[in-house]
Image (cartoon, rainbow, N blue to C red):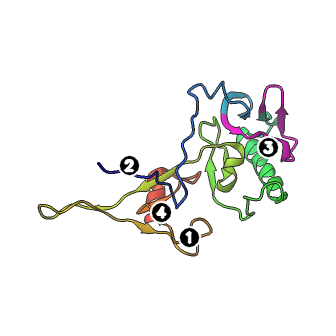
C-alpha cells in the first residue's frame, strides 16, 4: 500500500486548513465587520490588530462594542461611490504611511479591485484589500493538449512566473491568470492576461 501524499501548497507554501464556522457572519469574533453605510451587509472582516493600529480617517466610524468599522454615509451632494472610494484611499494611504505597523504593504500602488456586493461602485487597491478583509476575484485559464494516440495522457501547460515580478518570481503558475480589476470582467481579465 502506498503512503499518502504530503499536503501540497501554492507557490511552495505549505497547505494549511482552517475551520471557518458556517455561521461566521454572526460568529466572527475577534474580527470586526466592515460596513458601507447605509448598507447593513458585511463587506469584509477586519483583524483587531488592524483596527487598533490604523489611523482611521474621519469618514470611518469604529464601534468597539458592536465590533464594526463603517464608512459613514456620504455628505449631501456626494455620491456613495465617490465618498466610499475616497475614504478607502485615505485609509490605504494612512496604512502605507505607517510601514512599521503594516510591513506587508510595499507602498507601490496597484490596480483597483471591486468591493464585492457593494450597492455602488466601490473599489480598493488590490494590495490593500486584505486590510479590510475584502474578498478579491481572480480568473484562471488552464490550457491543455488532448491525447492524440491511444495510451497518451492529457497534457497540461504550466507557466512560470516572470523572475522580475515582486510576488512569487520564477514560480510555477496557471497557464493564464490574473486578478479581476474593478473595470474588468473575468473573461476580460483572461483575454488581457493572455495577450
Residue 167, image x and y in percent?
60, 65
Local secondary structure at mark 2: loop
Foreground: disc 2 or disc 1: 2
Residue 152 visible in image: yes
Q: Distance between the residues labelled 4 and 2?
A: 39 Å
Label 3, on which residue? Answer: 49
Label 4, on which residue? Answer: 192
Local secondary structure at mark 4: helix
Work out whether mark 2 precedes mark 1 in sequence or the reverse, and give the earlier one.
2
Residue 195 visible in image: no
Q: Report if the CB atoms under discs 2 and 1 are less than 8 Å apart.
A: no
Local secondary structure at mark 1: loop
Say the numbered circle drawn on residue 81: none
Q: Is 170 situated left or right of 64 in this image? A: left
Q: Give the range drawn in magenta.
A: 43-68
Q: Distance between the residues labelled 1 and 3?
A: 29 Å
What residue is drawn where x is 43% and y is 62%?
Answer: 176
Residue 4, image x and y in percent?
38, 49
Work out whether mark 3 precedes mark 4 in sequence or the reverse, and give the earlier one.
3
Amino acid at each position: 500500500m502506498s503512503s499518502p501524499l504530503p499536503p501540497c501548497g501554492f507557490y511552495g507554501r505549505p497547505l494549511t486548513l482552517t475551520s471557518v464556522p458556517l455561521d461566521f457572519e454572526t460568529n466572527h469574533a475577534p474580527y470586526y465587520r466592515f460596513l458601507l453605510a447605509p448598507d447593513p451587509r458585511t463587506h469584509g472582516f477586519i483583524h483587531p490588530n488592524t483596527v487598533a493600529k490604523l489611523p482611521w480617517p474621519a469618514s470611518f466610524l469604529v464601534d468597539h462594542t458592536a465590533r464594526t468599522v463603517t464608512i459613514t454615509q456620504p455628505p449631501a451632494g456626494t455620491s456613495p461611490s465617490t465618498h466610499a472610494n475616497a475614504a478607502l484611499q485615505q485609509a490605504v494611504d494612512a496604512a502605507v504611511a505607517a510601514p512599521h505597523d503594516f510591513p506587508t504593504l510595499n507602498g507601490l500602488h496597484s490596480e483597483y479591485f471591486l468591493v464585492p456586493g457593494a450597492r455602488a461602485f466601490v473599489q480598493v487597491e488590490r494590495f490593500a484589500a486584505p486590510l479590510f478583509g475584502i474578498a478579491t476575484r481572480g480568473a484562471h485559464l488552464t490550457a491543455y493538449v488532448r491525447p492524440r494516440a491511444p495510451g497518451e495522457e492529457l497534457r497540461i501547460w504550466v507557466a512560470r512566473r516572470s523572475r522580475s515580478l515582486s510576488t512569487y518570481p520564477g514560480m510555477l503558475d496557471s497557464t493564464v491568470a490574473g486578478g479581476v480589476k474593478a473595470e474588468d470582467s473575468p473573461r476580460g481579465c483572461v483575454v488581457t492576461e493572455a495577450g
